[in-house]
Amino acid sequence: MERPAEVSERRSPSVPDYNVSTSTLAFDRHFTRTAKGILLLAEIVCGMLVWILVGGTEYFHLSALCWVMFVAISCWVLTVCLFITDLTGAHKRIPQVPWTTLSLCLNCGAAALYLAAAVADALSANQATRGRHNYNCWAASAFFAFLTTLCYAGSSYLSYRTWKTTEEEK
């Protein structure tokens, strides 16, 4: 009584055969192993630690720490966007944007802002009582802010070399 299921493969001539899965973004697996990729990942991780450590305290009582939070979150968001752009290869698909100049400006600006924020963070840690939660978090965030500054300085150097090479080719 069981009938074998008959599957007939009929196609309507009016329906075109489209490739359903098309992707315009590629994933560059080797990017995270380059110096630029490693520095971007370090900036993201260290920058996130800065704003998490400061954000976990009552930082809003000190205007200097509000500045640290502004710098940390702003630079972190921009760095994540740049990382995604480089990781997916979107920068190659949008040649109208001067990516080398943009990267150079972002990294140099972030290095300068982070240096000021790291100094403000370190000086604010002195206003807290030693051994308390705020002091420990602010001291740790100052350390990571200086570390993030070094990462942005390294990225600035790499961006400058790339920019200089690009400008000489023109």
Image (cartoon, rainbow, N blue to C red):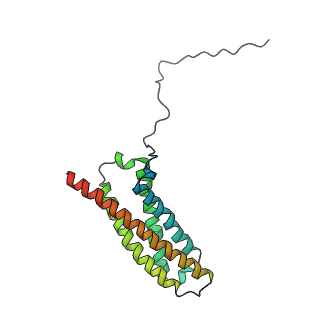
Total marks shown come to 0
Question: Along the horizontal axis of the image, is 135 left or right of 47?
Answer: right
Question: Along the horizontal axis of the image, is 168 left or right of 27?
Answer: left
Q: Can residue 160 be seen in this view?
A: yes
User: Residue 55: horizontal and vertical position, in percent?
Assistant: 56, 73
| Quarter of image, res 150 | bottom left
User: Residue 170: horizontal and vertical position, in percent?
Assistant: 19, 51
User: Residue 118: horizontal and vertical position, in percent?
Assistant: 45, 77
Identified at 48% across, 81% down, the residue is 122
Q: In this view of the protein, which residue sits in the foreground, 163 or 88?
A: 163
Compared to residue 161, the image places residue 47 above or below, namely below
Identified at 51% across, 63% down, the residue is 45
Q: Can residue 70 be seen in this view?
A: no
Compared to residue 99, the image places residue 127 above or below, namely below
Identified at 59% across, 74% down, the residue is 56
| Quarter of image, res 110 | bottom left
